Image: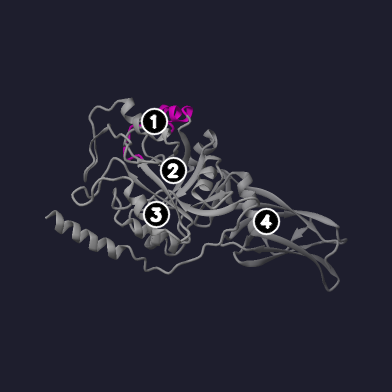
Amino acid sequence: MKLKLRISLLMTLVISSFSYAQESRVIIPDIPGYYTLKGDFHMHTVFSDGHVWPTFRVNEAIRDDLDVISLTEHIDYEGFPDIIDQDYNKSYEIASKAAINKGLIIIKGVEISPRVAPYHHNALFLEDANILPTEYMKSGKAEFVMKDSITHDQLMGPFLAVKKQNAFVSYNHPSWGWWDTKDTVLFTSFHQELLDAEILKGVEVVNSGNYNVIAHRMALEHDLTMLCNTDEHYDNHPRYKDTHRPMTLVFVKERSAKGVEEALFNKKTALYFGNYIIAREPEAEALFKSAVKVTTERKLRKAEPLLVVNFVNNSDIPFETKLKADFDIEGFPMGQVVIAPHDTTQVILKAIWKYPAKTTIKVIVENILVTPESGLETEFMLSTEEIN
């Protein structure tokens, strides 16, 4: 019977290893001093509670134009214990082999997932995932049952183990209340303990395309790296077929696992989901000004002097801006301008009776969030002296 189940599962997984959706490019620029890599650091396969084979995740990532992924299997749950032998390194090994010479970086990771505080966390850049203890579990074979009485040391066990492996630990999807509806404290004393012990380094601000304002505030308050992941268990194409998949943009010094590790520990990320970017101000401004270049030219409309400002957007992101200049902005009430992707958006400044040598245009980018309450504020210095 077990052999038949294995054969049946194998046939299903072979079919699922092919991705039929068309490959797509996602155009996001590099920023000064760094390469921009596109990543997803939270996904599952049949080696925990996912429903695809690790090679599918590789093909899917290449289809979606990602540069780096991690398959973060639950260390405390096996979805197919009668068919697949427990091995929390195996999905990484299979994916790594499938990714050879394909330009995709695979990071070894797991998900630690008790349903009591401190709740779910990913641990990335592991050496060996099989040695992590899960003594808080009663059964994780095709069911998730924790022990009736769980100690603090049992819950801390896997975190201390990943710390010995110098892992990068991030808090996944805070505020998912299905595990403890009585506890409304999301950054608990346990999280503070993990932070004080220099174990907790990041937080998932966007999960499956859903923005978590509480997690965003948590990242800023506790100086945590921000992440944006799919947490996918199936093929993600149906969910994101009309847009790009959510992704973490990682700003790296080198295109390697080591470069990704250094960037995550140094909080060099931005989050890209829908038409939104979330980032700290330095990365937000660098990304916006790498994507959008500005030129200015003098024009005469009959006898009326004008300045034509050309915003050239070389990225996939439509930037929703609010402009303010020293002169009147024509045709855009309140200066509200969408700088279209892969296009030139022209803005005319008028009521110019004498051309200035230089002038400034201030920009609020409303879909680049630097805090939950505010968009990126920046400016461009417009030179008009030598352009006629």
> Label 3, label 2: how many angstroms apart (C-alpha)?
13 Å
Residue found at x 61% / y 51%: 34
Q: Which residue is mark 1?
A: 160
Q: Earlier in the sequence, mark 1 or mark 3?
A: 3
Q: Earlier in the sequence, mark 3 or mark 4?
A: 3
Q: Earlier in the sequence, mark 3 or mark 2?
A: 3
- For badge 3, the amino acid type reads Ser
The dominant secondary structure in magenta is: loop
Judged from the image, the secondary structure of the residue bearing numbered disc 2 is: loop
Q: Residue 383's image quarter?
A: bottom right
Q: Which residue is mark 4?
A: 334
Mark nearest the camera among 4 and 2 is: 2
Query: Which stretch appears magenta?
Result: 177-197
- Residue reaching furthest to the right: 354
Mark nearest the camera among 3 and 4 is: 3
- For badge 2, the amino acid type reads Phe
Q: Which residue is mark 3?
A: 96
- Front one among 2 and 78: 2
> Label 4, label 2: how many angstroms apart (C-alpha)?
48 Å
Mark nearest the camera among 1 and 3 is: 3
Residue found at x 33% / y 51%: 91
- Residue reaching furthest to the bottom: 302
Q: Please report contact status of discs 3 and 4: CB closer than 8 Å, yes or no.
A: no
Q: Residues within 10 Å of mark 1 (few under 14, many from 20)?
A: some
| In the image: residue 313, left or right of residue 82 | right
> Label 1, label 4: how many angstroms apart (C-alpha)?
54 Å
Q: Which residue is mark 2?
A: 125
Q: Residues within 10 Å of mark 4 (few under 14, many from 20)?
A: few
Q: Residues within 10 Å of mark 3 (few under 14, many from 20)?
A: some
Q: Please report contact status of discs 1 and 3: CB closer than 8 Å, yes or no.
A: no
| Rendering coords of residue 24 (x, y %) | 48, 66
Q: Is residue 365 magenta?
A: no
